[in-house]
């Protein structure tokens, strides 16, 4: 019996540090997430103290340089962290993804020195929680249509509009918000909790990412000081560059969810007997397991190669779209298929498949839907835009 | 204070155990190795806590092949200041390891040598006692708590039906078990810093293996359970007589 989830020895392509990182995050997930996650998901509550714990581990903004509180890791290390966190739950990985790629990344890339010094160290430690506002009630796949606006006044901007499906908004101390200026250009700015007219209503009754706090961002004549604006970035490339970083992390993360389902199903298949032999001895069950490990292996290789390209600054948005789309799809299929192997037990909270499968319904939708990523690949190979 | 923590390499707890070479040698094919948990969770973390409270230096040490360097790097990533690998061909017997560790500890002025209670591989419990003997120091085994006040160590041990509290003045050797500390995870900064901290590789000094393993035997797997209900006493007695042949 070969219980390895590293079928093509991808490990051998990792550095000693990267292997240590994986072990440390895996230990964290085994110790601090897996024993409690079902309870929080069932209660539809976020995990208290998750962010300081992720901060202490160094999982928030790991690729941000040390002088701003990060660990200065490379992109493959970031991917490995996401993979191991999502082995615990997509809610945990989402919290780390948003803080790292959608809040710390834009502040580090587009922020002023003062903004970096003010926010990054506290975001890295988890003392401060951030969220990212791009999607709007009427503009999901088409962010260019956004209605949220800033109007320039003498020493501040007046912000009006609303964002929705915002991970961590109910908990956030700050929000990186994208809004159009009077010239119709997309600008980014940092909105702080406590600013008059800024509220973050919680989104209730999700069947997915139940251990993650999701909400809206509502801005009613919020006066945002001018020093909170990202000075130079204009247009959608600002938020899209953040999404590229997050989507890259997701391509790794979902492999973790698939691995967890596979580990559980393989063990179950060797222990559960029907018709006088283990489940693993039946052809249809072997098909499920063999296809799962094949797809996990392909996804690992795709993400690893994408990580190499990203480290060399050569990863294209289209490559990232392909990896995100492929890996989320294989992960959700693995979660659904392997859930069936457990029969009735597969729907119970003691086993992770149902939770992972439900989480992956969000992951296949957010950060660019499955279909939108297909169109990105389609446009890349044909040169023809088929979005509108 | 200078703390020397002994780090062993052991098979991962989920590894399938088998032997080769006519059952004289552990078969490491396909086995993942980890740092011995009692060394890592209890010995190393307690030494780090004491150092953090009142200063000093925590060194981790292993006697074994060069590849064991990675376990020492893991220990550094958790917080050790430096590491020493006494290079030997392969994992070997405790006497030989203890002799070399004791020599290093003595020559480099360590106040405390700390091991985990046992390695989870061979469970021999023997290293600490031998090191203490070679260094002519007191040895406290299976300690559950260790407080240090100046030169005086207060050490708790579990004993049958209760607890024993010991005071040791000056240097000593301690083996640590559950209760001594909590597992500490290496964080990302620690992992990145680990490669910048010193790891010395020194040749084995005293090479005399006294004990050879002549054979390993795997415990036969437990047989199938046969259940009897309360009204089947006669059948039970008969089975014990004719099948199990124990009465």
Image: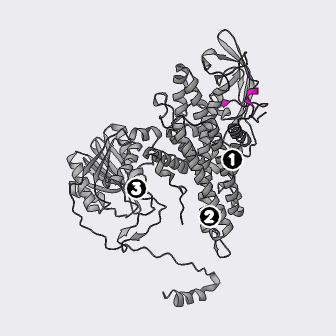
Q: Secondary structure at mark 1?
A: helix
Q: Which residue is at the far top? A: A154
Image coordinates for residue B231, horizontal then vertical, percent: 64, 84
Quarter that holds the N terminus of chain A? bottom right
Magenta segment includes A134: yes
Disc 2 crowd rating (10 Å Cα; few below 14, some 14-19, many 20+) is some
Seen at 51% across and 29% down, the residue is A121
Q: Which residues are magenta?
A: A132-148
Few, some or many C-alpha atoms within 10 Å of disc 1 (few <14, some 14-19, many ≥20)?
A: many
Find disc 1 in the rendering and name its residue: A360
Query: Which residue carries the number 2 mark?
Result: A268
- Res B217 quadrant in image: bottom left
Q: Is residue A36 visible?
A: no
Main SS class of the magenta portion in the image? loop
Q: Which residue is mark 3?
A: B36
Chain of residue at mark 3? B
Residue A181 place in picture, x, y as percent: 71, 18
Asked whether B122 or B3 is in front, the reply is: B122
Coloring basis for residues: one colour
In whole angstroms, how far apart are the C-alphas of marks 3 and 1?
36 Å
Camera-side residue: A321 or A41? A321
Q: Quadrant of residue A270?
A: bottom right
Q: Mark 3 and 1 residues: CB-CB less than 8 Å, in contact?
A: no
């Amino acid at each position: 019996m070969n219980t390895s989830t590293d079928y093509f020895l991808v490990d051998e392509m990792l550095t000693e540090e990267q292997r240590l990182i994986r072990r440390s995050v895996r230990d964290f997930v085994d110790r601090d997430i897996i024993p409690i996650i079902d309870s929080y998901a069932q209660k539809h509550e976020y995990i208290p103290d998750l962010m300081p714990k992720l901060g202490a581990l160094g999982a928030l903004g790991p690729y941000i340089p040390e002088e701003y509180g990060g660990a200065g890791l490379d992109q493959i290390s970031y991917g490995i962290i996401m993979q191991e966190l999502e082995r615990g739950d997509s809610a945990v990985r989402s919290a780390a993804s948003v803080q790292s790629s959608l809040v710390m990344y834009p502040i580090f890339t587009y922020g002023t020195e003062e903004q970096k010094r003010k926010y990054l160290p506290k975001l890295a430690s988890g003392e401060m929680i951030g969220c990212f506002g791009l999607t709007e009630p009427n503009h999901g796949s088409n962010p260019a249509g956004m209605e949220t606006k800033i109007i320039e006044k003498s020493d501040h901007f007046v912000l009006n509009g609303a964002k929705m499906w915002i991970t961590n908004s109910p908990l956030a101390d700050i929000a990186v918000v994208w809004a159009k200026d009077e010239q119709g250009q997309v600008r980014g700015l940092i909105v702080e909790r406590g600013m008059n007219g800024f509220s973050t209503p919680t989104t209730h009754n999700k069947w997915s990412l139940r251990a993650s706090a999701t909400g809206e961002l509502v801005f009613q004549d919020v006066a945002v000081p001018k020093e909170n604006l990202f000075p130079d970035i204009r247009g959608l490339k600002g938020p899209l560059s953040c999404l590229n970083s997050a989507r890259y992390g997701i391509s790794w993360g979902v492999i973790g969810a698939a691995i967890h389902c596979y580990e559980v199903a393989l063990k179950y298949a060797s222990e559960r007997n029907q018709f006088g032999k283990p489940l693993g001895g039946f052809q249809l069950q072997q098909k499920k397991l063999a296809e799962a490990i094949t797809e996990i292996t392909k996804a690992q290789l795709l993400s690893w190669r994408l990580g190499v390209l990203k480290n060399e600054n050569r990863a294209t948005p289209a490559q990232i779209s392909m990896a995100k789309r492929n890996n989320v799809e294989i992960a959700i299929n693995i979660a659904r298929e392997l859930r069936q192997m457990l029969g009735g037990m597969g729907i119970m909270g003691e086993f992770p498949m149902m939770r992972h499968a439900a989480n992956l319904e969000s992951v296949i939708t957010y950060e660019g839907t499955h279909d939108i990523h297909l169109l990105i690949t389609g446009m890349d190979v044909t040169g023809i835009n088929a979005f509108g | 204070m200078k703390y020397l923590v002994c780090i062993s390499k052991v098979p991962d707890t989920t590894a399938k155990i088998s032997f080769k070479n006519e059952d004289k040698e552990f078969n490491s094919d396909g086995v993942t190795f980890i740092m011995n948990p009692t060394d890592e969770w209890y010995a190393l973390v307690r030494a780090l806590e004491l150092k953090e409270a009142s200063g000093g230096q925590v060194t981790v040490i292993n006697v074994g092949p060069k590849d064991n360097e990675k376990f020492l790097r893991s220990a550094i990533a958790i917080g050790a200041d430096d590491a020493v690998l006494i290079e030997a061909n392969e994992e070997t017997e405790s006497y030989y390891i203890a002799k070399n560790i004791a020599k290093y500890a003595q020559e480099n002025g360590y106040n405390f040598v700390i091991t985990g209670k046992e390695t989870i591989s061979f469970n021999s419990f023997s290293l600490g006692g031998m090191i203490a003997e070679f260094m002519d120091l007191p040895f406290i085994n299976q300690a559950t708590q260790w407080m240090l006040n100046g030169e005086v160590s207060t050490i708790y041990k579990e004993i049958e039906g209760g607890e024993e509290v010991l005071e040791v003045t000056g240097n000593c050797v301690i083996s640590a078990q559950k209760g001594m500390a909590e597992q500490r995870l290496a964080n990302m900064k620690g992992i990145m810093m680990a490669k910048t901290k010193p790891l010395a590789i020194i040749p084995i000094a005293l090479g005399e293996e006294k004990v050879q393993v002549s054979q390993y035997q795997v415990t036969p797997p437990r047989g199938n359970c046969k259940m009897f209900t309360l009204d089947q006493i006669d059948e039970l007695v008969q089975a014990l007589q004719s099948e199990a042949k124990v009465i």
